Image (spheres, rainbow, N blue to C red):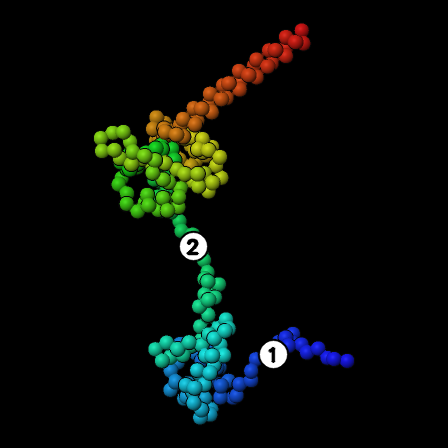
């Protein structure tokens, strides 16, 4: 009976054995907090060996692993393989509170949009830093919405869909009115001019809702009248 030779054994070989000196060099470099030169490594091992030759041998052994032994400026250290560096990156979200100026600016844009920088400063009664709008735009809560048709053509600003999404709003008119904010004790409505509070897109949506409510009431009245006549 002829035996068939298997040229591709399914047995995974164990890593090659290394001698005591190589183990010591490996351990010292691994435990070091910073890259080490050859002299420093020689001063820490128990046996007299060719440290440079040992390091070069270990470098070859680790060349195909997730951790590589590298030499930079004649100092040795273990580093994550360059091909796996993307796995080591970590993204961390840092939450920062908006400044009072940013919050006030956002509120004015929300209720008065589209609005220019000069109009924002006029409503606030104070000028604000150039980075205030930049912060709101980086958050993608505010964006430029064309230019106002007045001398100088100033840029107008308004809110984005990301703003609505972040605050779980379907539309701008879902925001509370000045009367609702006053009733909740969040603002002193006696010091707020209603004529300038609800302007722009927010005001238009509110007016549209009022019209829709009127139409709904008319429909209900007509439906009720027709039902009464049919019953007769």
Answer above or below: position of 187 versus 1.
Answer: above
Task: Give the position of the C terminus as an image quadrant.
Answer: top right
User: At 43% from the left edge and 35% from the top edge, which residue is drawn?
Assistant: 185
Judged left or right of residue 25, residue 158 is left
User: At 50% from the left edge and 71% from the top edge, which residue is drawn?
Assistant: 66
Q: Position of residue 35 (x, y in %)?
A: 39, 77
Task: Give the position of the N terminus as an image quadrant.
Answer: bottom right
- State the residue position of label 1: 13
Judge whether residue 28 can be spotted in this image: no
User: At 36% from the left edge and 29% from the top edge, which residue is drawn?
Assistant: 200
Question: Looking at the image, which residue sits at the far top?
Answer: 232
Assign a secondary structure to mark 2. Answer: loop
Q: Position of residue 211 (x, y in %)?
A: 46, 20
- Neighbor class of circle 2 (other Cα within 10 Å; few <14, some 14-19, many 20+) is few
* Mark earlier in primary sequence (2, 1): 1
Query: Front-most of 1 and 73?
Result: 1
- State the residue position of label 2: 94
Q: Which mark is residue 194?
A: none
Answer above or below: position of 48 versus 63.
Answer: below
Disc tally is: 2
Q: Position of residue 56 (x, y in %)?
A: 44, 82
Query: Front-most of 104 and 47?
Result: 47
Viewer-side label of 2, 1: 1
Query: Front-most of 115 and 189?
Result: 115
Question: Looking at the image, which residue sits at the far right?
Answer: 1
On the image, which quarter does residue 202 sit in?
top left
Question: Looking at the image, which residue sits at the far bottom?
Answer: 48
Q: Position of residue 6 (x, y in %)?
A: 67, 76
Q: Are marks 2 and 1 in contact (CB under 8 Å)?
A: no
User: At 26% from the left edge and 35% from the top edge, which residue is drawn?
Assistant: 154
Answer above or below: position of 67 versus 96.
Answer: below
């Amino acid at each position: 009976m002829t035996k068939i030779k298997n040229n591709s054994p399914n047995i995974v070989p164990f890593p090659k054995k290394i001698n005591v000196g190589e183990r010591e060099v490996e351990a010292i470099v691994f435990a070091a907090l910073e890259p080490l030169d050859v002299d420093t490594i020689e001063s820490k091992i128990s046996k007299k060996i060719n440290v440079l030759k040992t390091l070069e041998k270990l470098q070859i052994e680790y060349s195909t692993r997730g951790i590589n032994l590298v030499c930079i400026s004649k100092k040795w250290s273990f580093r994550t393989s360059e091909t796996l560096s993307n796995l080591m990156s970590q993204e961390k979200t840092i939450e920062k509170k908006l400044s009072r100026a940013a919050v006030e600016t956002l509120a004015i844009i929300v209720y008065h949009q589209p609005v220019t920088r000069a109009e924002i400063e006029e409503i606030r009664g104070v000028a604000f830093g150039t980075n205030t709008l930049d912060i709101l735009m980086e958050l993608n809560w505010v964006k430029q919405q064309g230019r106002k048709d007045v001398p100088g053509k100033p840029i107008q600003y308004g809110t984005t869909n990301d703003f609505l999404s972040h605050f779980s709003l379907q539309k701008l008119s879902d925001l509370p009115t000045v009367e609702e904010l006053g009733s909740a004790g969040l603002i002193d409505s006696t010091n707020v001019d209603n004529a300038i509070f609800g302007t722009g897109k927010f005001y238009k949506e509110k007016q549209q809702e009022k019209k829709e409510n009127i139409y709904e009431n008319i429909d209900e009245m007509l439906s009720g009248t027709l039902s009464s006549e049919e019953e007769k």
